[in-house]
Image (cartoon, grey):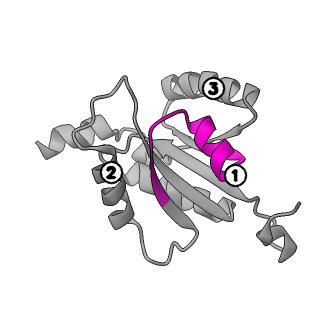
Amino acid sequence: MSSPAARNGDSRPGRAAYPGTFDPFTPGHFDIADRARRLFDQLTIVVAVNDSKRPTRTTTARANRVRAALPAEWENVTVAAWHGLTVDYCHRHGCGVIVRGVRNSTDFLHEYQLAAMNETMGVTTLLLPARPQLTTMSSTAVRTLQT
């Protein structure tokens, strides 16, 4: 079955998920979301729980902050709070692709391992390189500057 975009002559594939802790949602996250929303019919920013991180806000509060940061004209972007594996979210909500941003080789190696695991579970991962001017920015650095 073709996506709505493909039926209308647009070559963008269907649905993608952009997961992250987003504590906070940085300019780098915003840029990846902006680029991804142009590639897919529908992009869901999945605000997730990551046991290895200790977010300063609840998942719902972080999702609300991300939602508030998005321009109104981004009509094909939604935000969802999720507790569980991103692949499970994708299977439940019809997302065929997980989008992830990578800033450097360390990010790439980590994301590549996750991408391989996601692929074995039936979901492709698209790694988007960060723009050079955003590579030094991380949520941890932004949180540190805010305190």
Position of 56 relative to 67 (above/below): above
Residue 61 located left or right of residue 93: left
Whether the magenta-drawn stretch holds residue 87 is answered as yes
Along the polypeptide, which appears first: circle 3 or circle 1? Answer: 1
Question: At label 1, which amino acid type do we have?
Answer: Gly
- Residue annotated with mark 2: 60
- Judged by depth in the image, the label closer to the viewer, 3 or 1, is 1
Who is closer to the viewer here, 34 or 95?
95
- Residue annotated with mark 1: 94
What residue is drawn where x is 51% and y is 72%? 74
Q: Are marks 2 and 3 in contact (CB under 8 Å)?
A: no
Residue 109, percent from left and from top: 57, 22
Say what secondary structure mark 2 lies in: helix
Who is closer to the viewer here, 92 or 67?
92
Residue 46 located left or right of residue 111: left
Residue 124 located left or right of residue 145: right
Disc 2 to disc 1, C-alpha distance: 22 Å
**What residue range appears in magenta?**
79-98
Question: At label 2, which amino acid type do we have?
Answer: Thr
Question: At label 3, which amino acid type do we have?
Answer: Tyr
Position of 55 relative to 40 (above/below): above
Q: Residues within 10 Å of mark 2 (few under 14, many from 20)?
A: some
- Residue annotated with mark 3: 112
Residue 3, percent from left and from top: 80, 64
Say what secondary structure mark 3 lies in: helix
What residue is drawn where x is 41% and y is 46%? 134
Disc 2 to disc 3, C-alpha distance: 28 Å
Along the polypeptide, which appears first: circle 2 or circle 3? Answer: 2
Whether the magenta-drawn stretch holds residue 128 is answered as no
